[in-house]
Image: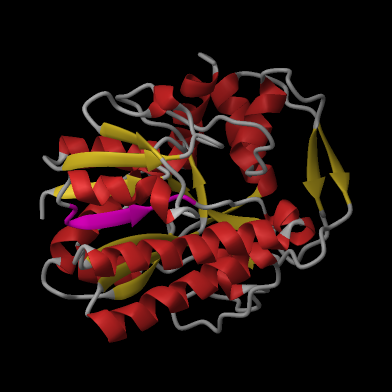
């Protein structure tokens, strides 16, 4: 397996996957429509095509020009709130786009796909311990539903056409690359770490913390944060496993939970800034604690997260963010 097509490779997670693949000796082809991606995040060693997974005609030429051995699909919309008011946008891209990818894979005899999914497929998590891959899937918004449908499309295609898959369900992704000048940017970012850092940089007046009366030690919600480089290294680890015709669904997280106030405290320490915040009402459907078990990825893929210290995750993001 040599030539990897990375769809959405000009985005935050996709651009990190591109450099890790290149550094691991793979040839990389990037497909992105640049709607939410940035050309300056794409490593110059990769071959770039502008195209859209919703339109087969716009990207079929990639398969004509190149022998593609595997696809990593990061071309997804990810904003939960937006998905509620524009559900069709999410189903067209996140589900129908994957159907198009599968159709082209079948036509050009590409047998391997690595898919970027989400912990949002689980919906309202109510377990007290770690979330395993067999936890019931019951998404509560179109974003989670569109990704779960795409998972089903891939699994059905695997049964019908012999396609191998690694499906990764992400928990909370953060940080930036410490070797390359790539990180998270763009309008309307909803993740906690960039919002805290925007506040530290003075781009937001204060941080809103949703709820301070959860049954947790400090009353704020607990989440699992994984560094983006750890995350994409799991994707690279999946390729030799796919080569052995082994398919699977894997959670990707750190296995450790941090509360919002703990994240804020870490950010204050890293940035040296007094970050203003206020408590507001809980958001509907926000569980008290969601922490992943990534044991399956560790056992099957031989993967283990290296960024287990939340200060280091936030520090890498801050070093990138200060240069924007």
Task: Provide the residue span drawn in magenta.
Answer: 68-75
* Residue at the image point whose x is 42% and y is 69% from the top: 293
Q: Quadrant of residue 45?
A: top left
Can residue 149 be seen here? The reply is yes
- As for residue 69 lying within the magenta part, the answer is yes
* Residue at the image point whose x is 53% and y is 74% from the top: 149
Q: Quadrant of the C terminus?
A: top right
- As for residue 115 lying within the magenta part, the answer is no
**Left-right relation of 283 to 275:** right
Can residue 304 be seen here? The reply is no
| Percent position of residue 224, x then y | 53, 56
Q: Quadrant of residue 27?
A: top left
As drawn, 8 above or below 145: above
Give whichever of 190, 154 is nearer the camera: 154
| Percent position of residue 93, x then y | 55, 57
Circle count: 0
């Amino acid at each position: 397996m040599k030539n990897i097509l990375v769809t959405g490779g000009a985005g935050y997670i996709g651009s990190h996957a591109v450099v890790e693949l290149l550094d691991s000796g793979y040839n990389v082809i990037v497909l992105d429509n640049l709607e939410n991606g940035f050309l300056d995040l794409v490593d110059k060693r990769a071959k770039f095509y502008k195209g859209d997974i919703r339109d087969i005609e716009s990207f079929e030429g990639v398969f004509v020009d190149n022998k593609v051995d595997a696809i990593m699909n990061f071309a997804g919309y990810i904003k939960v709130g937006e998905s509620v008011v524009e559900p069709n946008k999410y189903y067209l891209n996140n589900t129908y786009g994957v159907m198009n990818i599968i159709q082209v894979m079948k036509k050009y005899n590409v047998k391997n796909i690595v898919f970027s999914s989400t912990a949002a497929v689980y919906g309202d998590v109510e377990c007290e311990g770690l979330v395993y891959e067999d936890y019931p899937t019951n998404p509560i918004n179109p974003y989670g539903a569109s990704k779960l449908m795409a998972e089903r499309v891939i699994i059905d295609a695997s049964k019908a056409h012999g396609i191998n898959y690694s499906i990764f369900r992400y928990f909370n992704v953060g940080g930036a690359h410490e070797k390359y000048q790539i990180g998270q940017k763009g309008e309307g970012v909803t993740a906690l770490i960039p919002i805290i850092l925007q506040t530290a940089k003075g781009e937001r007046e204060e941080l809103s913390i949703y709820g301070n009366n959860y049954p947790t030690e400090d009353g704020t919600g607990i989440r699992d944060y994984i560094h983006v480089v750890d995350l994409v290294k799991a994707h690279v680890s999946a390729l030799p496993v796919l080569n052995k015709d082994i398919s699977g669904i894997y959670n990707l997280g750190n296995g450790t939970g941090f509360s919002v106030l703990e994240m804020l405290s870490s950010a204050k320490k890293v940035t040296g800034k007094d970050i203003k915040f206020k408590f507001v009402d809980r958001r509907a459907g926000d569980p008290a604690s969601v922490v992943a078990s990534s044991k399956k990825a560790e056992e099957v893929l031989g993967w283990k997260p290296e960024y287990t210290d939340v200060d280091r995750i936030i520090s890498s993001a801050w070093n990138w963010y200060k240069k924007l």
